[in-house]
Image: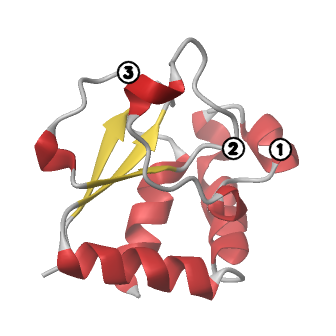
Amino acid sequence: MTQIQIKRAYAKVLASDGKRILVDRLWPRGLKKENAKIDLWPKEITPSTELRKWYAHDPEHWEVFQRCYKVKLLKQPEILQQIREMAQQQTVTLITAAKSEDYNHVIVLKQVLEQG
C-alpha cells in the first residue's frame, strides 16, 4: 500500500514520517541540514526556477501551473518510480517550505506519484 504524505519543512521531525524527501529546488530558509533529516533531495522533480517565479503562488495561475508542472514531472519517470517504490515499502513524506497548503507544487507531485 502506497503511503505518501506532505509536511512543511519547519514541522517537527517524527519517526512516522518514514523517508523524508525534500521537493523544493531551494533549501528551506533558516533550516539546519542536520535538523531536517532529509533522506533524498531530487531537484530534477522540482518546478523550474522560471515556472516557480511565474507562478508565485498566485491562485489565478494555478491551473496553468499544474499543467506545466505535470509535463515536467512526466519527463522524470526514473525518480518518480524510485519514490513510488519507496512508498510501497514505507511511508514517504514530501517535505516543502511552501506556506500555501492549497496551491503548491507538492499537491501536484503527490497526485502524479499516486496515479503512477
Per the image, label 2 sits on a secondary structure element best described as loop
**Numbered badge on residue 25:** 2
Q: Residue furthest front?
A: 34
2 and 3 marks in contact (CB < 8 Å):
no
Quadrant of res 73? bottom right
Dot in front, 2 or 1: 2
**Numbered badge on residue 10:** 3
Per the image, label 1 sits on a secondary structure element best described as helix
Q: Is residue 9 visible?
A: no
Please determine whether, in this image, residue 60 is positioned above or below residue 17. Answer: above
Q: Which numbered disc, 2 or 3, marks the residue that appears first in the sequence?
A: 3
Q: Amino acid at mark 2?
A: Arg
Q: Which numbered disc, 2 or 1, marks the residue that appears first in the sequence?
A: 2
- What residue did someone put label 1 on? 49
Left or right: where 83 falls relative to 98: left
1 and 3 marks in contact (CB < 8 Å):
no
x and y, in percent, of residue 26 in the image? 69, 35
Whole-angstrom CA distance, mark 2 to mark 1, is 8 Å
2 and 1 marks in contact (CB < 8 Å):
yes
The colour scheme applied to this rendered structure is secondary structure
Q: Which numbered disc, 1 or 3, marks the residue that appears first in the sequence?
A: 3
Please determine whether, in this image, residue 66 is positioned above or below residue 95. Answer: below
Q: Is residue 91 visible?
A: yes
| Residue nearest the observer in this picture, 2 or 106 | 2
Quadrant of res 69? bottom right
Q: Residue at x 12, y 82 (%)?
A: 1
